[in-house]
Amino acid sequence: MAEPPASLSGQDVGSFAYLTIKDRIPQILTKAIDTLHRHKSEFFEKHGEISSIFLQKGMEAEKKAISLLSKLRNELQTDKPIIPLVEKFADTDIWNQYLEHQQSLVSESDGKPRWFYSPWLFVECYMYRRIHEAVIQSPPIDDFDVFKESKEQNFFESQESIIALGTHLQELLKTIEDLDENNLKNEFFKLLQISLWGNKCDLSLSSGNTSSQKTNIINSLEQFKPFILVNDMEHLWSLLSNRKKTRGKGTVSRVDIVLDNSGFELVTDFILADFLLSSKLATEVHFYGKTIPWFVSDTTIHDFNWLIEQVKHSNHKHLSKCGVDWENYIKMGRWVYHDHIFWTLPHEFCAMSQVAPDLYAELQKAHLILFKGDLNYRKLTGDRKWEFTIPFRQALNGFHPAPLCSIRTLKAEIQVGLQPGQGEQLTASDPSWLTTGKYGVFQFDGPL
């Protein structure tokens, strides 16, 4: 089999990877530093109320974290060599081994990976891991999430659209038992599309600035349809509906969702997951989130639980009913949350069976895996300079734990599985089509 193409990287001046490293990542770091400054009084209240010793520790911790993040920003902007992690954490050794591997690939005279010349996927993941290192090196504020404020703001600013989704779901559930197969399929497709376009709300794309959903997304689905470049929703319906018809009583039908953004997008994922159980297309849904704050808005266990609590305590009856139901699904074991350090490593997914065999084995228990968002797509396909027409299965490079589907709006210069000429036509009519989140895909790999 031919060697896969080169990785996307910042050495291609003017590329999205280059602009991310040059502009977006420094902006995200600046915003993280500003957040630590603004929360100074909170640290002092939390850690300084017992004695002057704790007050001193709170002040020192805030200064240390800011100093480490400022140093990181300088390293990036001056294209310094990428250095090993120093603080002991569950994944430190794996990260440093990966960095050694990157060093072995470098042809420059000093033999050290640098920000603009190393694979974009690696350096972007490394930057977020260094943010985490700066915080965990600064007790007693070592559990502080520098992105929490932005994630919660996204949720609160999207309230109108979230209420519309909650109302739609509760009205749908009243009649779901009476829907014929065709109507059930139409509702499934509608909620899949809502989950797709929910993926537009990505704070890492907007450099941590507001990225909320302020309009009712349900009313926009028809006008968004032409922007779905690969539409494998029929495969998802066939797989789940056939299993529903043929499975015996008490047999599990499991859908796994590898989450992307918290806030509005997570609500759309929960709405879809609720429908899967209520329609009996699935008997359980497993969610995968991140162990540490990641790519600004990615979902952690705190974000997952916080959102359910917010929805449950909403003063809107349909929304609060959703929250009560979702909490019950968790108590009953019909919704299960997992996290794993692999999701915040720089490895592409084809390495999962070697690097995280326990996670790969867990995914193999699913009957369908939905991978949400752009970072998951980049890791599925290796973040490489593939031709647009290369089959999705080929780009997966042997990663097949179970039938899977990428549900993603495009925010990186990588897309495979298109029809001949489709990518070129898009480039001619809309030069930035790969990076704005305007276009989306449902891209399936599994038995057809």
Image: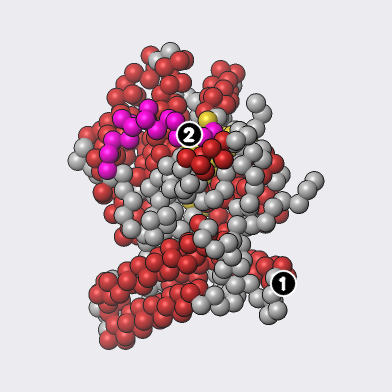
Relative height, residue 157 to residue 92 (above, below): above
Between 109 and 61, the one lying in front of the other is: 109
Relative height, residue 257 to residue 235 (above, below): below
* Number of dots carrying numbers: 2
- Whole-Å distance between the Cαs marked 2 and 1? 40 Å
* Type of amino acid at the residue the image marks with label 1: Ser
Q: Is residue 223 magenta?
A: yes
The residue depicted at 43 percent of the width and 13 percent of the height is 180
Residue marked by disc 1: 107
Q: Secondary structure at mark 1?
A: loop
Between 208 and 334, the one lying in front of the other is: 208
Residue marked by disc 2: 228
Q: Earlier in the sequence, mark 2 or mark 1?
A: 1
Identify the magenta region.
214-230
Relative height, residue 440 to residue 352 (above, below): above
- Residue 20 point in image, percent of width and height: 48, 61
Q: Quadrant of residue 327?
A: top left
Q: Is residue 403 left or right of residue 271?
A: right
The residue depicted at 40 percent of the width and 51 percent of the height is 202
* Type of amino acid at the residue the image marks with label 2: Ile
